[in-house]
Structure formats: C-alpha cells, structure tokens
Image: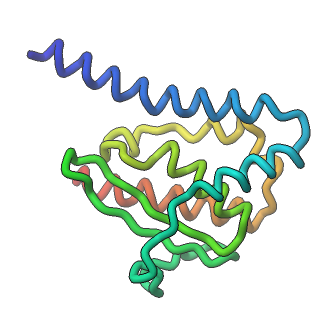
Amino acid sequence: MTNKLQSLELIIDMNYLQEIKSIIEDFSFFESWEDKYQYLIDLGRNVPAMDEALKVDKNKLKGCQSVVYFSSFENKDGTIKFLANSDAAIVQGLIGLMLKVFSDRTPQEIFDINIDFLKKIGLDEHLSPTRKNGLSSLITAIKHIAKQKLN
C-alpha cells in the first residue's frame, strides 16, 4: 500500500513540475520581451472570469497597484482551486501563470512548489517593482492558504 501511495505522490509531483517545465519552454521560445509580454497577456485572456459576487473588498489582494480580486475553495479531492482577476492585462497574465502552477494542487504541493522558475523565465528582471510586489503578494496569499489547510 505504501508503494502505491508513493507512486501516486510521485505522479502528482511530476504534474506540477511538468507544468513548470512547460512554462519555462514556452518562455524560452520567445526571443524578445515584447513577445513574452504578449504571451502573458494571452495567458490572461484565458483566465476564467470570477463571479461578480466574489469581487468584494475582502477579496481584494493587498500590495498590488492594480485591482486584483483573489479567492479560493477546496475541491472534493482536497486540492485547492484559486480564482483571481485583475483590471490590468499583464497582471491578469501573471495571474494566469500562477493559476497554471498552483491551482488544483494539494496544500502540501502548493507549499512545496519552488518559485525559482520565475528567475529562469526572466520575470525577476523584467517586471516593474510594483508588478513584482503584486506577484509576491499573490504568491504569499496562495502559500498562506496552503499553510492554513496543512495546519
């Protein structure tokens, strides 16, 4: 039984690692940052719109220059689904990127995900300080929810 559980955990781990690998490959495909920003904007267009009932002050993410609404819920299988929307195109793209990596994962997976891939794709060097702060706030909020579920 333990071997089956370990195999399942390895498959789950590989799932988010595969997503990160795919993001790194996608970003390396583009040569210019103008193209990479366009890719982010395109990612943002694919983020599902949040229900208007969730767009309330208590769901506004602090630390973002743009308006960002953020919410989550637990799926039946114990994974956490994150919802977020922004009024700014590039920020919406950053949300799309983070949702691809963190949403629909177990609390332990979320907590364990290493965000070093952001350096590998160059976001640490090509985001304005205010967007970096907003991205950091989003990641902190995601990790905080995972930590709460673990405790």
Question: Which residue is located at x 64 percent, y 62 percent?
Answer: 92
- Quadrant of the rendered structure where residue 138 is? bottom right
Percent of width and height locating residue 116: 62, 37
Percent of width and height locating residue 83: 45, 63
Colouring chosen for the image of the structure: rainbow
Q: Residue furthest left?
A: 1
Task: From the viewer's perspective, tell me whether residue 116 is left or right of residue 32.
Answer: left
Percent of width and height locating residue 16: 46, 33
Observer-nearest of 18 and 142 = 18
Instruction: Count the numbered circles shown.
Output: 0
Question: Which residue is located at x 55 percent, y 76 percent?
Answer: 62
| Residue 111 position (above or below residue 25) | below
Question: Which residue is located at x 39 percent, y 59 percent?
Answer: 144
Observer-nearest of 88 and 65 = 88
- In the picture, the quarter occupied by the N terminus is top left
Task: From the viewer's perspective, tell me whether residue 70 is left or right of residue 132.
Answer: left
- Quadrant of the rendered structure where residue 85 is? bottom right
Task: From the viewer's perspective, tell me whether residue 107 is left or right of residue 86.
Answer: left
Question: Which residue is located at x 91 percent, y 40 percent?
Answer: 32
- In the picture, the quarter occupied by the C terminus is bottom left
| Residue 53 position (above or below residue 113) | below
Q: Residue furthest bottom?
A: 57
| Residue 89 position (above or below residue 5) | below
Percent of width and height locating residue 87: 66, 75
